[in-house]
Image (cartoon, grey):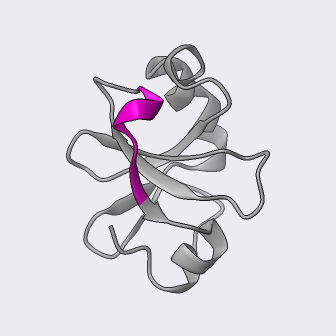
Amino acid sequence: MLSSLGDTTVGDLAHFYAPADLLERNETYETRTYCPGWLAIGDDGGGSAIVVAPDRWPTAVYLVGHGSMSRADFVAVAEALHEWVGSGCEL
């Protein structure tokens, strides 16, 4: 279960940002500039952001390097966020 109070790490790699930190993390990584319409919800601890498009359902999950946040560089992780979370957030 994901914590509603702070950042949460699931499994060995998926690190989810605390809800209170989402805006700051997305501003820091300039997600809106480089990936308009996408939201970084966490990272893999190795330089890649976990991103989703919150206005789409089902919400697919992707990894993208913080230094190359271009849609062309997205790597598919899962077709649906809810299924990915339910299965343990494997990256």
| 64, above or below 85, in the image | above
- Magenta highlight on residue 63: no
Tell me the quadrant of the picture where the N terminus can be found. Answer: bottom right
Farthest residue in the left direction? 46
Residue 74 is left or right of residue 25, and the answer is left
- The spot of residue 46 in percent (x, y) is 20, 46
- Magenta highlight on residue 74: yes
- Would you identify the image quadrant in which residue 53 lies? top right
What is the count of numbered marks?
A: 0
Residue 46 is left or right of residue 37, and the answer is left
- The spot of residue 45 in percent (x, y) is 25, 50
Question: What residue is shown at x 55% (from left), y 19% (from top)?
Answer: 27
In the image, 78 versus 30, the foreground residue is: 78
Farthest residue in the bottom direction? 87
Farthest residue in the front direction? 72
Tell me the quadrant of the picture where the C terminus can be found. Answer: bottom left
- The spot of residue 37 in percent (x, y) is 68, 30
| 59, above or below 36, in the image | below
Farthest residue in the top direction? 33
Question: What residue is shown at x 60% (from left), y 79% (from top)?
Answer: 83
Question: Magenta region: which residues?
Answer: 70-76
| 12, above or below 73, in the image | below
In the image, 17 versus 53, the foreground residue is: 53
- The spot of residue 12 in percent (x, y) is 25, 72
Question: What residue is shown at x 56% (from left), y 67% (from top)?
Answer: 79
